[in-house]
Amino acid sequence: MSSYRYTPFSSFLAGYLNGKIQKISVHAGFTCPNRDGSIGAGGCTYCNNQTFSPDYCHTGKSISVQLTEGIAFFSRKYPSMRYLAYFQTYTNTYGELHELKALYEEALRVEGVVGLVIGTRPDCMPDDLLEFLAGLSKRAFILIEYGVESTKDETLIQINRGHTWLQAKETIIRTSEAGLLTGAHLILGLPGETHEEILLHADRLAALPLNTLKLHQLQLIRMTRMAQDYQMNPQLFHILTVDEYIDLVIDFLERLPQSIVVERFTSQSPKELLIAPDWGLKNYEFTHKLLHRMEERDTWQGKAL
């Protein structure tokens, strides 16, 4: 059992890359098939991409410039640090194959960049791109992160996600079988999901060949359709307190095998955009509270398996 009581991302990365590693977010100018009318319009009801775009990261700059500026920011403190280009904003496999190849290759040509983390949707990974990425993984660190968000189809419809749980499950399996490191992202506390249904997410994900998992609390963000829904029907939402969320995460972790790396438990949106919950905690402060509670409960990741 890890001394962390869960399997952290740092130990996972150390198995592939030596030294200090930092992810740098880049905005490659992608949109989303759930926004441009291909499968839907308006996007997911909770989505406002301003919540995770750093200042250096916008479409007015090339991938190389964004990475160079990000590296300049971090290298002042850690000159020997190496970097992963994090294609984070919107759907980063949604484009023509030759254009995607050019963007990924551009990122890998930047000095100090040793790999890519590519965030995307489970309905946006065609076979030819998967084959290309599998080949790329022979010479660089490649991690594909799929936004799953929920394993309950009723919830996926309600939040206008535009894909099904089956699509997510099949794409995760297909990606792993191609030899690629595979991650998933899940939101805990979506409207209408009970504690028991959330724990079923853990059971379903535990059965898949996942390498990494990101969790975060439901956040209500200004200028989203979910914020409007909350304003009109607040009784449909249960905004978790930090203590409620910690116990929920622990229950979730107990049902996950230790082979799945838990990269993140929370997300921090800019205060000017966040409606609720405002816990006033940084990510490391939350993790400290989580570990303290795990010690109190004498529990660890995978205990219930």
Image: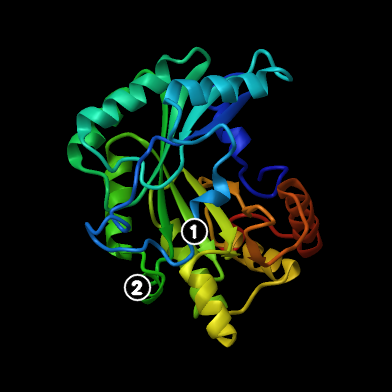
Can residue 222 be seen in the rendering of this structure? Answer: yes
Determine whether label 1 and label 2 are within 8 Å by CB. no
Look at 30% across and 42% down and name the residue there: 175
Quarter placement of the C terminus: bottom right
Name the residue nearer the viewer: 247 or 226. 226
Look at 62% across and 19% down and name the residue there: 72
Can residue 137 be seen in the rendering of this structure? Answer: no
Badge 2: residue crowd in 10 Å (few <14, some 14–19, many ≥20): few
The quadrant in which residue 238 appears is bottom right
Which three-letter amino acid code belongs to the residue tagged 1? Leu
Badge 1: residue crowd in 10 Å (few <14, some 14–19, many ≥20): many
Residue 115 drawn at (x, y percent): 45, 24
| Residue under label 2 | 157
Residue 30 drawn at (x, y percent): 35, 42
Which three-letter amino acid code belongs to the residue tagged 2? Ile
On screen, residue 12 versus residue 172, left or right, reads right
In this rendering, the answer to whether 59 lies above or below 51 is: above
Label tally: 2
- Number of the label disc, if any, that sits on residue 186: 1
